[in-house]
Image (spheres, rainbow, N blue to C red):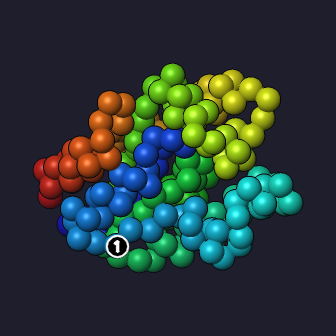
Amino acid sequence: MVRNIVLTGFMGTGKSSVGKELSTIRNIPFIDTDEEITKKFGPISELFENHGEEFFRKCEHEIILQVAKTSEVVIATGGGVVMDPDNIKVLEASGEIICLTANPEELVNRLTGAGEVGVRPLLDVDDPRNAISTLLAIREDVYKQFAQFDTVGKSPSEIAHEIDDFLNAKN
């Protein structure tokens, strides 16, 4: 049995909504690292604005160390968590890392609609579409090292069931 299930992937791929569904299916708690960062350090947008990305990443690492000590939980991480090899080591030691994916066009649609850009500091730029493409290109090789689940055209429940089936087949 997998101790923890860790969901990673680019922003907008559905980590939080899929994570909540997966925790319900498996009847285990759900932890969102962005929510934990906000509880402990304050709003993420303010951390970026007042202290910069490097400070935010230190806060994020502290939360990763904290949540990795738990057992039998679904953890949704921020999209950049796995860019730090130390975070990968900690998370892999705590459970199975699953990567949610979506094509760039879908991510642009999800992230530039519904007021999402303003709440995502890395996209709060003049050209969010370009920022998405650039960040995806930078992160692509890291994301590819984990089991991939495409989220395009599927509900969070469908994706959560696919992940559950995948994990059950491994055990």
Viewer-closest of 15 and 88: 15
| Residue placed under numbered mark 1 in the picture | 29
Q: Is residue 86 above or below residue 120?
A: below
| Picture coordinates of residue 8, whole percent (x, y) | 46, 49
Residue drawn 52% across and 25% down? 104
Q: Is residue 128 visible?
A: yes
| Picture coordinates of residue 18, whole percent (x, y) | 35, 52
Q: Quarter of the image for the N terminus: give it.
A: bottom left
Question: Which quarter of the figure has residue 31?
Answer: bottom left
Q: What's the residue type where badge 1 is placed?
A: Pro
Residue that lies at the very extreme toward the front in this rendered image: 114
Viewer-closest of 99 and 14: 14
Q: Is residue 97 above or below residue 102?
A: below
Residue drawn 41% across and 77% down? 70
What kind of element bears circle 1? loop
Q: Quarter of the image for the C terminus: give it.
A: bottom left
Residue drawn 77% across and 61% down? 47
Q: Is residue 25 above or below residue 139?
A: below
| Picture coordinates of residue 43, whole percent (x, y) | 70, 64
Q: Is residue 97 visible?
A: no
Residue drawn 66% across and 47% down? 120
- Describe residue 51's horizontal placement relative to residue 115 as left or right: right
- Describe residue 69's horizontal placement relative to residue 36 as left or right: left
| Picture coordinates of residue 81, whole percent (x, y) | 57, 53
- Describe residue 122's horizontal placement relative to residue 73 as left or right: right
